[in-house]
Image: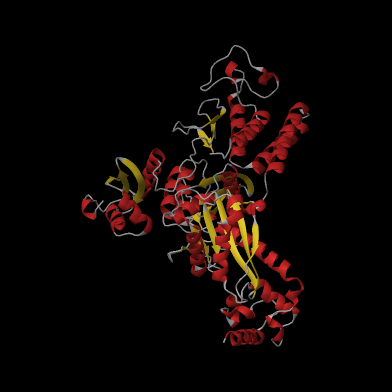
Amino acid sequence: MKASDLPRLPAAPGVYMWKRDGRVIYVGKAKNLRARVAHYARGEDKAARIFAAADALEFIVTRDEVEALLLEANLIKAHRPEFNVLMKDDKHYPFLKLTNEAFPALVVTRRVDDDGARYWGPFPDAGAVRRIKRLVDRVFPLRKNSGVPMKKRRRPCLNYAMGRCLAPCVGRADPDEYARVVRRVEQLLDGRVDDLLAELTGRMEEAAGQQNFELAAELRDQIKALERFFSSSQQAYAVELGDLDAVGLARSGPYAMVQLFQIRGGRMLGRTSRFVENAGEATDAEVLEAFLRDYYLVASPLPPLVLLPLETGGREVFARALAERAGRKVELRVPRRGEKVRLVEFAGRNARAGLEVELARLEKRGDHPALASLQRALGLARRPWRIEGYDISNLFGTAVVAAIAVFEGGKPKKSQYRRMRIRGLAGKPDDYKAMEEAVYRRFTGSLQARMESPDLLLIDGGLGQVRAARKALERAGVSLPLVGLAKREEVLVLPDGERVVLPLDDPGLRLLIHLRDETHRSGLAYNRQLRGKKALKSVFDDVPGVGPARRKALLERYSTLEELRRASVEELAALPGMNRRVAAAVLEHLRGQSG
């Protein structure tokens, strides 16, 4: 699409839809449609990709930003556009509904209608709804078997005989008494558990004082049931926190998890999670706004305060939209101090734990998120199921060894690890030549026959090591994708010199770091095994001030003489037991040797 193809847009609030072949690929809202859409024509990154992918634009003018927000949410749910941040489809999340009738019933539903009923939810799983519904059915005598709307019956059901229903369906319920039961159910579902327990305790004591022991016993059982439920399944917080929600966010490459904790009356009442699988190009603020749109525009009831982990550009618009839904002020705030900060941090830690669970679930079903990430980042034709890592280890030119570690499906396959000695370097430390020899031997002779062909090679090192590995593959007549992982920078290096920078929390990068470390550990262990007692004598023996402890620190940190020579005084001085004077002496000694 060209900028000249754009329609003349008004400088008014509304929603715009980028389309390709008649299909909606992105939906956005704007305070000023003309200014917002113009941004795509001259934008970068995601905006540029959307503009390049689209062949048409449609827009709808709204009265204000709040109406634009609501329309955007509906259109995203309807079209599920590929460029929008999409939460897992929430159509399966259930609600509890207290029907709008003279004698209301509490039912489970997956649909919210504008029918005057009260709704609570959405709940993260059906199990949570069943537990709460069972508690209400056991403690409060609401009608259960007379349908919605209520149908008249000839005789009461068994619940009436058990004292668990007031039987309005046969005309035996007192309307005022039933209304009191409904009010207590609302108190419970609103999270005002302490108020409810205080009311029931007062009624129990009053009944006992009037020697109505049957009623007192019934109320006692209700109190015990409530106390057991909330003491066993909820976590108490400070009462002064009142009613609020705390939201936490965690990211890993294109994956994200948002978790919300509901605090009602200072008590932890429940938790809701949303997992995102297409957040690769989205900012943290965009992921958070997608959650706010997905959850709060249907959730009920709404608290007066929502604690967020970070600022978002649309925070005020969301606050106005939620205030309209709640009929009162709803504040969205990023806390700066005190107990509220702790709550947001708590939600964030749980979001991280939840994200790890989701990633492990993907891994378990053979869909490791790191493999998809590497395929995208490196432009591979298929997901790299088998990845082999290569590392060279030596004692400054002696006992040169190569290690090969193997990951399949994102997991180490230690039975496939291999190690080899590299000879013929004439005592000179040459990591490039050693790497070329190791890769060449892997793809010729017995190893080629005994080991499966990998989908990707990971080389521990920079461009020099990667090109040495490519030269070995060319000698062996093998064509395979390979990538290097430069130490300290954690940047991917391709044979043509291109550098691929991934976020440190990207699952693909994390997998390669794990493989690199496994390969290095294997090679270092073999190197030490070969060195034996020679490890006690090293090139540092003639350096004043370098004893066994400092020698050990240097040997554990650096694998090659060249790597150590490139280090700075500050870097060496930061090692355990080192200081600037000794660090300078080590480098002066080594650089003098090289001269």
Of the 4 image quadrants, the one containing the C terminus is bottom right
Task: Decide: is 154 above or below 267.
Answer: above
Does any portion of residue 247 appear in the rendered image?
A: no
Residue 589 location in percent, x, y?
63, 87
Residue at screen point 62% across, 57% down: 405
How many marks the image carries: the answer is 0
Q: Compared to 187, does 338 lie above or below?
A: below
Which color scheme is applied? secondary structure
Q: Quadrant of residue 226?
A: top right
Image position, residue 174 (x, y; %): 61, 23
Can residue 166 be seen at all in this image of the molecule? yes
The residue at 62%/67% (across/down) is 422
Place of residue 479 in the rendered image (x, y in percent of width and height, measured from the top left): 47, 55
Residue visible at 33% across and 56% down in the picture: 48
The picture places residue 104, in percent across and down from the top left corner, at 55, 27
Q: Quadrant of residue 587?
A: bottom right
Q: Residue at x 50, y 69 (%)?
A: 464
The residue lying furthest to the top in this view is: 154
Task: State which quadrant residue 43 falls in.
Answer: bottom left
| The one of 78 and 509 positioned closer to us in this rendering | 509
Compare residues 223 and 296 and report the one nearer the observer: 296
Foreground pick, 433 / 193:
433
Query: Is residue 544 depicted above or below 415 in this figure?
Result: below
